[in-house]
Image: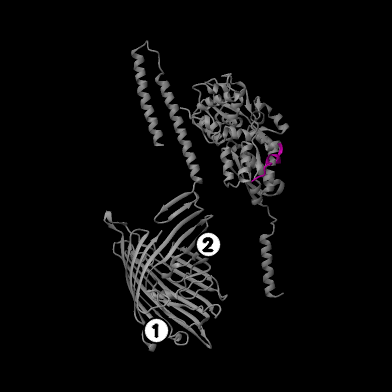
C-alpha cells in the first residue's frame, strides 16, 4: 500500500467516524410553546416524559418551555419562534399558525385523539375567602361595585374562554329587555361585565398575579386549574372557588409544528411527547394539576376533585372557533366595540 | 409613568380634603345624610392606587416584551444609518463615501489623464453588517470616475476572535497607507511608495486585531495575486499569492504616553505571476500623486515568475502629532523575448501630520472637538500634513523592459497640505505635491517636474 493510499484510507476512516451514526445515546431538545397557566403541568410532565423516552429509546431529551397568552404565543410562532410543538389554549390559535405561516397542515386537529385535546378545563370564579361580595353566578359580575379580573381576549386564550362563557350564560339567562334579541342582550351583559374590569393582563397567569398577589379585584375569572392552584398555594383561608351555574367546555389542543420538526429532525420525539399526554401517566399528571383528563379510568379516579358544572361547547353555542373569533375577537369585532376600561 | 404617579397624588389630595370636609360637615350637622366615611374613601383610594400601579406594571412588562422583538434603528454621525435586532445578532449599517476632487497638474502630459479636472473620485455606498452574531459582511460598490465596480465584497467569520476568517474581495493586508480607510488618508492620493502595494484582491485570510489586549494584530492569507498598484477580479495565471502582515503596538494602553501611539509592522507577499499576450502583462505602471503615469513596462514585457514584496512600516502618534512611514521592496521576474530578469523596485515615504486645533492625531480620522458652525464661531479642526516619498525603478528594467525615453527611473515627491475637518463627516483637503524625476525623456534627460494642486470635498458616514 503506497503512502498516499494509506493517508487517504486514514482520512476516510476519520471522516466515517465523525459522520457515521453514533452508537452512543443521542441528545435532543424540543421547544414546547404553551399558554400561560400550564407552567407547573409541563414542568412535571416534561420530567416524566424525558424519563420515559430515555427508558424507551436510550436517548436523552431536554424540553424547553415558553409560556404566555395563547394568542401572543401563536403570533410568536408565526413570526419565527421555532416551536417543535404547540400546546395552546384554543384551536383557533393553532389554526392561525396554519393559515398565516403554513407550519402545520390544515387537518392538524385530527392527528391526535379527542380533536388533539388530551385534557379539558372550564372557567370558574375565584373569590376572596368568605366571598364578601356574595358572588354566586355570572349575574353578580355586572353589579355596580364589583371588580372583575380577567385577561385581555386579544392576547389570552383563557380570556376568550371567559368572555364566551359569559356570553353563553347571558344568551340563556340575561332577560333585561324583551325587545332585544338574545345576541343584543348578551352584548349588553358582556359590556357591563367589562366595565367592571379595571386591569387587563396579557395572559391568565398575569391576571392571577393581579388578583392574588396584588390584591386587586373581587372576583377572578379563571381557568379551573389556575383557580385550584391559587387556592392550594395561597391557602384555603384566603381564597375560595365559586362554580357558576353554566360554564364553557375548554379544550386546549396540542400539535406538532411539522415544518419545524422536519427541519430539526425531531419529529419522532415530538410525536411521542404529545402522544404520551394521553398515556396513563400523562393523564395522571394532568389530573394532578387540575386539568380534566380524557382517559376514562383516570377521569373516574379523579372525579371528586372536579366540581360538577353545566358545560356548553363552543360548537353548539357559537358555531365553532372560526366564527367566534371573527365575530368577537377580530379587529373591530364585538370586543373592540364594547371594551372600555373601568374607572 | 410620571403622569400616573402625579394623578394618584392629585386624587389622594383631592379626596383627602373632601373627606376631611365631609367629616367636619358630619360633625357639625348631625341631621345631614351620612356620606362615605374617611376610612371608606381611603380604602377606595388604596384600591385605585393598586389598580394604577398594576396597570403601570403591565405596561412596563409589555414594553419590555416589545423591546425584545423591536429592532433598533439609529442614525448618527459615527455609524451612519443602522438597524439592529434587539439581541444584536443581526445588524445592517448603511454608510457612504463621496469624494469630489479638483485636480490641477502641470508637467508632462499623460495623454490618458486630464491635467485639470473636477472628478468624482469615489462614490461608494457602503453596506455592512452582521448576521447570526458571528458573521460580518461588507459590500461596497464604487461609482466614481464614471465607472461601476465592486471594491469590497467579503464575509468575515468571527467565531474565533483570535483567528477570524475573511473571504472575498478586499484590500490585501500589506501597505500601511493603502490599508488606511480611503476616508482617513492624510493626502488625497497615495505617496509614490504606494505604487508598489497591491490594492484589492480576492482571497481568504485569517486575521485578528485584538491579540494581547489589542497590542498585536496579524493577517495571513492566500489571494489571486495582484500586480503592484493593481486590483484583480480573477486569477489570470492560476498561481496564488500569499500575503502576511503583523503589526504591533507594544506600549498601547501602558502608562507611557509618548510610546502609547507607536506601532510597527512588517508585511510580505510571495507569489508567482505569469503574464502572456492573451492574459495580459501582469505588470504594474506607476503614477505620481497627480495621477500621471511616470513608469510603465514595454507592451511586450511580461511578468514571468517569482513575485516578492516586503515592507517594514510604522505609525506613531503623540497628542496632535502623527507620523506614518513605510519602506517597500517589490521584486518581480520579468521577461521580454529571450530576456529575463528579476526587477527589484523600491519605494519609501515619511508623512507627518499635526492637528493645529489640538485634537489627537490618528491613523483614523481626526474628530473635531467643535463642529464647523460659523454662527457659533466654531470652525472644526485643522490639520497640517507633509510628506516625502520616493520610488526607484531597478536599473535592470531599462532599456530592455521599459523605454527610458518615455519613462522615468526614479521619482521623488514632497508634498504639503491642509486638512479641514468640519465635523465627523465632512472633510476638506488641500494638497500640493512637487515631483521630480530622473530620466524619462529622450537623450537621458529628466522628465519635467510635476506640480499638482489637489483639492477634495469629502462626505463620509
Residue A177 visible somewhere in the drawing: yes
Tell which of B117 and A102 is nearer to you: B117
Question: Most extreme residue toward the right, as rendered?
Answer: A297
From the image, which quarter does the N terminus of chain A lie in? bottom right
Tell which of B158 and B95 is nearer to you: B95
- Image side of residue B88 versus residue A23, left or right: left
Q: Mark 2 falls on what kind of element? A: strand
Residue B7 at x, y = what percent? Answer: 39, 31
* Rendered position, A121 above or below B192: above
Query: In terms of image quadrants, where is residue A108?
Result: top right
* Rendered position, A52 above or below A231: below
Magenta-highlighted residues: A103-113
Neighbourhood count class around disc 2 (C-alpha, 10 Å): few under 14, some 14–19, many 20 upward: many
From the image, which quarter does the C terminus of chain A lie in? top left
Tell me if residue A108 is in the magenta stretch: yes
Which residue, given by chain and number where applicable, does mark 2 sit on? B155
For marks 2 and 1, the one nearer the N-term is: 2
Residue B376 at x, y = what percent? Answer: 27, 54
* Rendered position, B164 above or below A237: below
Q: Are marks 2 and 1 in contact (CB under 8 Å)?
A: no
Residue A243 visible somewhere in the drawing: no
Image colouring? one colour
Neighbourhood count class around disc 1 (C-alpha, 10 Å): few under 14, some 14–19, many 20 upward: many
Residue A206 at x, y = what percent? Answer: 53, 35
* Rendered position, B280 above or below A142: below
Tell me if residue A172 is in the magenta stretch: no
Query: In terms of image quadrants, where is residue A275?
Result: top right
Which residue, given by chain and number where applicable, does mark 1 sit on? B440
Query: In terms of image quadrants, where is residue B97?
Result: bottom left
Amino acid at each position: 500500500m503506497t503512502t498516499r493510499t494509506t493517508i487517504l484510507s486514514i482520512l476516510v476512516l476519520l471522516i466515517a467516524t465523525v459522520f457515521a451514526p453514533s452508537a452512543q445515546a443521542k441528545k435532543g431538545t424540543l421547544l414546547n410553546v404553551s399558554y400561560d397557566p400550564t407552567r407547573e403541568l409541563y414542568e412535571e410532565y416534561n420530567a416524566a416524559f424525558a424519563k420515559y423516552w430515555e427508558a424507551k429509546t436510550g436517548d436523552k431529551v431536554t424540553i424547553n418551555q415558553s409560556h404566555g397568552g395563547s394568542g401572543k404565543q401563536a403570533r410568536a410562532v408565526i413570526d419565527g419562534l421555532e416551536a417543535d410543538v404547540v400546546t395552546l389554549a384554543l384551536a383557533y390559535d393553532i389554526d392561525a399558525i396554519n393559515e398565516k405561516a403554513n407550519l402545520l397542515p390544515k387537518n392538524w386537529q385530527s392527528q391526535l385523539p379527542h380533536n388533539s385535546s388530551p385534557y379539558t378545563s372550564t372557567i370558574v370564579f375565584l373569590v376572596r375567602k368568605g366571598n364578601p361580595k356574595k358572588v354566586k353566578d355570572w349575574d353578580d359580575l355586572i353589579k355596580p361595585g364589583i371588580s372583575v379580573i380577567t385577561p385581555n381576549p386579544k392576547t389570552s386564550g383563557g380570556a376568550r374562554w371567559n368572555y364566551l362563557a359569559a356570553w353563553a350564560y347571558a344568551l340563556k339567562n340575561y332577560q333585561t329587555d324583551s325587545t332585544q334579541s338574545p345576541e343584543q342582550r348578551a352584548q349588553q351583559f358582556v359590556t357591563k361585565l367589562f366595565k367592571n374590569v379595571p386591569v387587563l393582563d396579557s395572559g391568565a397567569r398575569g391576571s392571577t398575579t393581579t388578583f392574588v398577589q396584588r390584591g386587586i379585584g373581587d372576583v377572578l375569572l379563571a381557568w379551573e386549574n389556575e383557580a385550584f392552584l391559587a387556592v392550594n398555594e395561597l391557602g384555603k383561608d384566603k381564597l375560595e372557588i365559586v362554580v357558576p351555574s353554566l360554564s364553557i367546555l375548554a379544550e386546549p389542543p396540542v400539535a406538532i409544528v411539522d415544518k419545524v420538526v422536519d427541519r430539526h429532525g425531531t419529529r419522532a420525539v415530538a410525536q411521542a411527547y404529545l402522544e404520551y399526554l394521553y398515556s396513563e401517566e400523562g393523564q395522571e399528571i394532568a389530573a394532578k394539576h387540575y386539568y380534566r383528563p380524557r382517559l376514562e379510568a383516570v377521569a373516574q379516579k379523579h372525579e371528586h376533585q372536579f366540581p360538577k358544572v353545566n358545560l356548553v361547547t363552543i360548537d353548539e353555542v357559537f358555531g365553532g372557533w372560526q366564527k367566534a373569533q371573527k365575530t368577537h375577537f377580530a379587529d373591530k369585532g364585538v370586543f373592540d366595540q364594547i371594551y372600555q376600561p373601568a374607572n | 409613568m410620571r403622569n400616573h404617579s402625579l394623578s394618584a397624588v392629585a386624587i389622594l389630595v383631592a379626596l383627602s380634603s373632601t373627606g376631611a370636609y365631609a367629616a367636619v360637615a358630619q360633625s357639625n350637622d348631625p341631621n345631614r345624610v351620612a356620606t362615605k366615611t374617611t376610612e371608606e374613601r381611603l380604602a377606595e383610594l388604596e384600591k385605585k392606587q393598586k389598580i394604577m400601579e398594576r396597570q403601570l406594571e403591565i405596561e412596563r412588562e409589555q414594553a419590555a416584551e416589545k423591546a425584545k422583538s423591536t429592532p433598533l434603528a439609529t442614525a448618527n454621525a459615527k455609524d451612519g444609518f443602522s438597524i439592529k435586532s434587539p439581541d444584536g445578532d443581526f445588524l445592517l449599517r448603511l454608510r457612504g463615501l463621496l469624494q469630489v476632487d479638483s485636480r490641477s497638474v502641470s508637467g508632462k502630459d499623460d495623454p490618458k489623464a486630464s491635467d485639470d479636472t473636477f472628478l468624482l473620485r469615489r462614490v461608494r455606498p457602503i453596506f455592512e453588517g452582521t448576521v447570526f452574531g458571528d458573521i460580518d459582511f461588507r459590500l461596497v460598490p464604487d461609482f466614481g470616475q464614471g465607472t461601476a465596480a465592486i471594491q469590497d465584497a467579503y464575509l468575515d467569520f468571527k467565531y474565533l476572535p483570535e483567528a477570524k476568517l475573511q473571504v472575498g474581495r478586499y484590500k490585501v493586508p500589506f501597505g500601511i497607507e493603502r490599508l488606511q480607510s480611503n476616508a482617513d488618508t492624510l493626502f488625497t492620493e497615495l505617496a509614490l511608495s504606494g505604487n508598489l502595494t497591491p490594492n484589492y484582491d480576492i482571497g481568504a485570510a485569517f486575521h485578528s486585531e485584538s491579540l494581547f489586549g489589542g497590542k498585536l494584530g496579524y493577517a495571513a492569507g492566500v489571494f489571486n495575486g495582484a500586480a503592484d498598484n493593481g486590483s484583480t477580479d480573477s486569477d489570470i495565471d492560476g498561481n496564488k499569492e500569499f500575503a502576511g502582515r503583523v503589526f504591533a503596538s507594544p506600549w498601547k494602553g501602558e502608562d507611557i504616553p509618548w510610546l502609547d501611539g507607536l506601532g510597527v509592522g512588517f508585511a510580505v507577499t510571495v507569489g508567482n505571476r505569469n503574464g502572456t499576450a492573451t492574459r495580459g502583462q501582469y505588470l504594474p505602471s506607476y503614477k505620481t500623486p497627480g495621477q500621471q503615469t511616470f513608469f510603465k513596462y514595454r507592451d511586450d514585457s511580461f511578468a514571468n515568475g517569482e513575485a516578492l514584496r516586503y515592507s517594514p512600516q510604522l505609525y506613531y502618534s503623540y497628542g496632535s502629532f502623527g507620523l506614518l512611514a513605510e519602506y517597500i521592496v517589490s521584486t518581480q521576474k520579468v521577461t521580454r523575448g529571450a530576456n529575463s530578469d528579476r526587477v527589484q523596485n523600491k519605494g519609501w515615504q515619511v508623512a507627518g501630520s499635526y492637528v493645529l486645533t489640538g485634537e489627537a492625531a490618528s491613523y483614523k480620522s481626526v474628530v473635531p472637538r467643535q463642529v464647523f458652525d460659523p454662527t457659533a464661531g466654531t470652525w472644526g479642526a485643522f490639520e497640517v500634513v507633509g510628506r516625502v516619498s520616493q520610488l526607484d525603478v531597478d536599473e535592470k528594467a531599462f532599456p530592455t523592459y521599459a523605454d527610458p525615453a518615455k519613462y522615468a527611473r526614479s521619482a521623488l515627491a514632497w508634498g504639503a497640505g491642509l486638512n479641514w475637518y468640519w465635523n465627523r463627516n465632512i472633510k476638506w483637503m488641500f494638497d500640493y505635491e512637487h515631483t521630480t524625476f530622473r530620466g524619462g525623456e529622450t537623450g537621458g534627460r529628466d522628465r519635467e517636474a510635476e506640480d499638482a494642486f489637489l483639492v477634495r470635498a469629502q462626505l463620509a458616514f
